[in-house]
Amino acid sequence: MIPPADAGGTDYSMKITGTQEIKAPRERIYAALTDPLILQRCIPGCESLEETIPHNYIATMKAGIGPVKGIFKGSVHLEDMQPPEHYRMIVDGKGGPGFVKGVGNFKLEEKVGATVVNYEGELQVGGVIASVGQRMIEAAAKMLAAQFFKGLEAEIKSPPDPLQR
Amino acid sequence: MIPAEFNYARVSTLDEALTLLAQNEDAKILAGGHSLIPAMKFRLIQPPLLVDIGRIKDLSYIREEGGQIRVGAMTTHYQIEASDLLKEICPLLPECAGSIGDMQVRNKGTIGGSLAHSDPAGDWPAAILALNAELVAVSKNGERTIKAEDFFVDLLTTALEPGEILREIRINKPNGRTGHAYMKMHHPASGFAVVGIAANLSFNGNNKCKAANIGVTGVAAKAYRATGVESALTGVNLDDASIGAAAAHATDGADANGDLFASADYRRHLAEVYTKRAIAAAMKSVPSA
């Protein structure tokens, strides 16, 4: 599923899985997770996210973990969209500290008064960040995912902005 | 291995350092430089300005004051390792210091720098948590103390605000029948803690545990107190069976991380084994009445 790694032998791939419960209807969450305006506000450090063709985006992200900061540019592609229960996200980004490639499946399950977002994917990281920061990558990925869902939850709780559409 | 361009300022007072930090929120404090400089050489950290606090007088000391041990933030690991005062009144600190990196790192690296960097595999956070330390942070707005358990926020992230400098570490002097130990599995290449457990136990008579503080590093994104182990030990006569049962809670509520060297499962296993060893060693260290 993941394209072959660039030359070099320092790449590191890992599986990321998690679940997040959000108190909102499934349709609402599915719409938010696939809305570029909302995503831009929730992705940690996201500076721009533009839709090029439907479900294809170009993004710039200034990711920071404590003092370690890097600007990443890359593409995000959504496919296998079955609203409101499933989609697949493919990410390919490059930045000063290295590159990130990944595929993730998002499944949304209904629960009384809430929606459970299950995500599982594979992330491949290479370059300096992988060779030097390898021991911290998993913790960093989890930290960014937690920040993303915290942002998403806040976004869904706040009333819709009438100027947005 | 050449850092990006940066400005450098060497200050001689804390006030000068705080002024520079207030003017430039991306500035980094240079203490011993043993985490910061390597990260800068790899260009993972590219601060526009380094504020070198190495020449500020009176940031490097170990003293006893008001029933507390006070350690200046710029005190090196080696100074702590070699302190006769600490060996006598708080042996966990020298024991932990002696397990850090190698001699070069211990000669230059500082306790304050290490804590402010909050490496998930750093040794100090475990000891500081087990000793219930308080950390004194100073900024242009004055001073505040932060409890050790509130200090470590997330991966490489502490409760220090931009513009704040960690000035001092305060530890209540252990009294009564207490025992300490720090047990770690060294990463064979880096010397970092794959898992590190600091135990600080106090006892009534015999082997009955009155209070237990267990700090864990290396397992999760930040160091944490193993509260499950602590409550399983408190009020209990410690023997192999009760220690084993308590150690099984070493990673309760913790989100263990894996890397190329050690998977999350392996880390959880190590945490249990090293918790047992740390508790047993802490018991042995109790001075006989």
Image (tube, coloured by chain):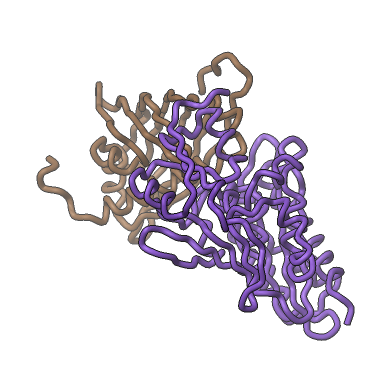
Chain colours: A brown, B purple
Q: Is residue B258 left or right of residue A109?
A: right
**Residue B12 locus on image (x, y percent):** 49, 49
- Indicate the position of residue B162 as horizontal and vertical percent values: 40, 51
**Is residue A101 found left or right of B89 in the rendered image?**
left
Query: Would you identify the image quadrant in which residue B104 lies?
Result: top right
Left or right: residue B14 compared with residue B278: left
Q: Residue at x 80, y 72 (%)?
A: B242
Residue ranking furthest to the top = A7
Answer left or right for B207 relative to A117.
right
Relative to the observer, which residue lies in front, B121 or B239?
B121
Vertical placement of B161 versus B70: above or below?
Answer: above
| Closer to us: B102 or A2 | B102
Q: Is residue B247 above or below residue B287?
A: above
Relative to B114, is B173 above or below? Answer: below
Q: Residue at x 88, y 82 (%)?
A: B289
Splitting the image into 4 quarters, where does residue B66 fall? bottom right
